Image (cartoon, coloured by chain):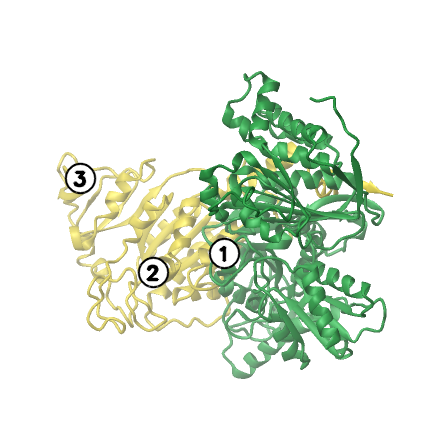
Amino acid sequence: MSEHVRERETRRLDRVVVRFAGDSGDGMQLTGEQFTSETATFGNDLSTLPDFPAEIRAPAGTPAGVSGFQLHFSDHDILTPGDAPDVLVAMNPAALKANLKDLPPGANLIVNTDAFTSGNLKKAGYATDPLTDGTVDPYVVHRVPLTSMTINAVHATDGGGGVNKKEAERAKNMFALGLMSWLYHRPTEGTVGFLEKKFAKRPEIAAANIAAFRAGFNYGETTESFTVTYEVAPARMKSGTYRRISGNLALSYGLVAAGELTGLPVYLGSYPITPASDILHELSKHKRFGVRTFQAEDEIAGIGAALGASFGGALGITTTSGPGVALKSETIGLAVSLELPLVIVDIQRGGPSTGLPTKTEQADLLQAMFGRNGEAPVPIVAPRSPGDCFDAAIEAARIATKYRTPVFLLSDGYLANGSEPWLLPVREELPDLRVEFATEPNHVGDKGPEFWPYLRDPETLARPWAVPGTAGLEHRIGGIEKSDGQGNISYDPANHDKMVRLRAAKVAGIANDIAPLEVDDPSGEARVLVLGWGSTFGPIAAGCRRVRAKGLPVAQAHLRHLNPFPANTGEVLRSYDKVLIPEMNLGQLRTLIRAEFLVDAIGYNQVRGLPFKAAELAGVLEDVINQ
Amino acid sequence: MTVTTNGSGVSNRLLDLVPTAPAQQTRKDFTSDQEVRWCPGCGDYAILATVQGFLPDLGVARENIVFISGIGCSSRFPYYLQTYGMHSIHGRAPAIASGLATSRPDLSVWVVTGDGDALSIGGNHLLHALRRNVNLKILMFNNRIYGLTKGQYSPTSEVGKVTKSTPFGSLDRPYNPVSLALGAEATFVGRSIDSDRAHLTSVLRAAAEHPGTAFVEIFQNCNIFNDGAFDPLKDRTSRDDVTLRLTDGEPLVFGTERDKGVRRAADGSLEVVSADSPDVLVHDAGAADPSLAFALSRITGDTHGVTPVGIFRNVDVPTYDETFNQQIAQAKERQGEGDLMSLISGTETWTID
């Protein structure tokens, strides 16, 4: 490498948004994940947004096949993956085409010039070369012959004897990672170790990737293209031990923890579906925790097996996305009638029907709330951030086991795949959720002691959970209406009316067993409340910060429980002049709020398959405040 | 109460894990206090009586027995047994029972279903329960009609069946449930008749002793909507001439005079010949290859003038739940019990003071 090292400016930034974009096969997710890992190790706060096509290998070189990964990192706590990138790495013309519209003028653009061939330009839909026709003029462009430099670097290291040209070329994402690591002063030891471990069985591939990574780093050091490098100091965060975690991983760990906290064996019945499959993959690894995973023949069998396991005394869980919930509806109704614990995890995605499998949306709220025949109330819990999926999973299991009811856990694609630093929980601070099975008869009849499966706990209205194998408590349950208490089949009109009301009262009563809705209003002078649920927490909070920074007061409240609502919800809503509800649907929470509290909330609704942007919500908030 | 949920018995077959009753149980122990509500004269009564009579002899404590059903006349069955039970939803009993059986190796789990429940709305679950070989006993009452919905044709009704929903005759060709089960890799397939208590008991006993999924088709008369569907097999004077009783290790012969036998035809199918023909086959339910069992399933009253009953196939292969629980036990043995906090922490952490 060159000895000529120029003096270079190092600029300190408080936050940066970077985006990697390339073909589905270019390894952009891996690159983004590894850059994130370096950033987490360095101590920045961060938030990520992977964005990839539903197809495994969409047509190469086309905008449809572009896979992207955005990372926002900072020296302070942040709430979103960032509105617009400060730097875009485009591995080919299609990646440029698909992402350029998001890049603000003046931002850094790193392009792989080797990929800008006439064939690739045509596939991307460019009539002329955007690198020369003025398209990229508004940006600070860094033209890097990434592919050829990668191949040269790999072959210079192994003397051409290690890997072939194609394998060498495949390491170009590591060249890009090396360059970005240099540009933002990221620690590199972790990546070298990661590559050695990942390719432990193919040391020549590991060597090629490490060579490309180092070459990218050194290229930054020697080229004259970059006059500035950037530093983002570690963030000042709450003291404690952190790790980086994605929503689906946190949710999986929450379910394992729920098994330990309830003292019940975890049983997952599931059928693969994007974006929920990762939970099945993760839980299938943890057999040493006694976790059983059953990949069923379909969605219906997945929840059926989970419910059967619950009958036997397990913590029955099923994981799916919106289309799967539709198929499971009848079994959820059965679980409502049987009054057995069951956790239904719905990682929401764009709908209706197949919709947008890899994009986020929160449009299953009303399906979770009402998507069954008859009066079939089901509690609903929603996490607000990737790390919060852990606590939300435990909360769903708590309600399910304590109240003997199916519970919906509504996450979404953004939380599932997004990641953030997570302050590790302390074991002693996790709740004790131990469950007791019925062991004795609970009624004395004409012929002596009897077991009545629907004789309820007067406080919780939960029925006893008597599991097969318990002598003397043999009983039958089913989807036909049962007599109050005794549990025999009953078609009596008054009994049905009573049972419907009892099931509703049981779920409604959970409102007394959950935390009240908290309001964040630093000024104490807000007249506008912005109410959200689920993954919109980050963007809404970021939007509020921006508005408050301008001196405008605004209050924020975020619902963890959607059914029932916290007991003080109506009181909170009515104490503001205006209530704004931003949602990634056409107003589902707003419908519920209006119906239940007669509060004329204002909606802000977008269903673009992407999370809200902080600036967008700040604008909406300002409008509502100033109206 | 002892609930074994950790799959501790790695070396045991599942049946060994089901606790036995401390004392001899009686039919009365298995009879619930619920009024039986099938139509008078329904074949289900005879099956219930047989099962209530047979369960005490099984020796399994009643609290460790679970009956799970779907929807239909037959699916009311669990209410009448003093065991644990679940009357679930249409077609899904095999899925629900699979979850229970795979999480509780200390239970004897039975599914009661009908031709509509198992073969129509629940066809997919049946196929997969059979192929997985979960430790389930599936009793399919076949009356070749929909009873509870008051008389529509079912997936086992003969072509041209005139019913409420097919006034001009049904169009679809029926399933042969035994062929279907064998095609789905079932490890135990049997057939019996509601009214033949001794035969039904023998098939149920063999099913109960089989580790893995056992599928038993029970011809059951619906005297309201399809009366007499199996009369030729029940008529005392003619039944021996039209029933081929399968007995493992015995020649495949039948007839009042035991003068007819079954042999391979040139095309590989089976044909009825004189019993003294030298190539009359000997039944082998334990054959690893299901070809003979399948060929036997193709013998029907319509095509051959005779209907086989008994055990078509009974082979011992590892069960799903056995292996399922072994994986858990082995993971604990090799890696030790899981530690929650070390799992959650992962390998890449950093600390902020």
- Looking at numbered disc 1 in the image, what kind of residue is underneath it? Ile
Q: Earlier in the sequence, mark 2 or mark 3?
A: 2
Shown colour of chain A:
green
Chain B colour? yellow
Q: Chain of mark 2?
A: B
Which of discs 3 and 1 lies nearer the camera? The answer is: 1
User: Mark 2 and mark 1: span between their CA atoms?
Assistant: 18 Å
Tag 2: Cα neighbours inside 10 Å, few (<14), some, or many (≥20)?
A: many
Circle 2 SS class: helix
Q: Which mark is residue B96?
A: 1
- In-front residue for pair A144/B142: A144
Mark 3 on the same chain as mark 1: yes
Structural distance between the alpha carbons of marks 3 and 1: 41 Å
Viewer-nearest residue: A121 or A533: A121
Give the letter of the chain under mark 1. B
Q: Is residue A77 above or below residue A8?
A: below
- Could you confirm whether marks 2 and 1 are on the same chain? yes
Q: In what element is the residue under mark 1?
A: helix
Would residue A468 be visible to someone looking at this image? no
* Left or right: A609, with A599 as reference point: left
Residue A177 drawn above or below residue A416: above
B85 left or right of B239 in image = right
Q: Amino acid at mark 3?
A: Arg
Which residue lies under the disc numbered 3?
Answer: B263
Residue A287 placement (x, y as % from top left): 61, 41
Which quadrant would the N terminus of chain A be assigned to in this image?
Answer: top right
Sequence-first disc among 2 and 1: 1
Q: Which residue is mark 2?
A: B115
From this viewpoint, which residue is outermost toward the bottom?
A: A494
* Residue farthest to the right, as pictured: B353
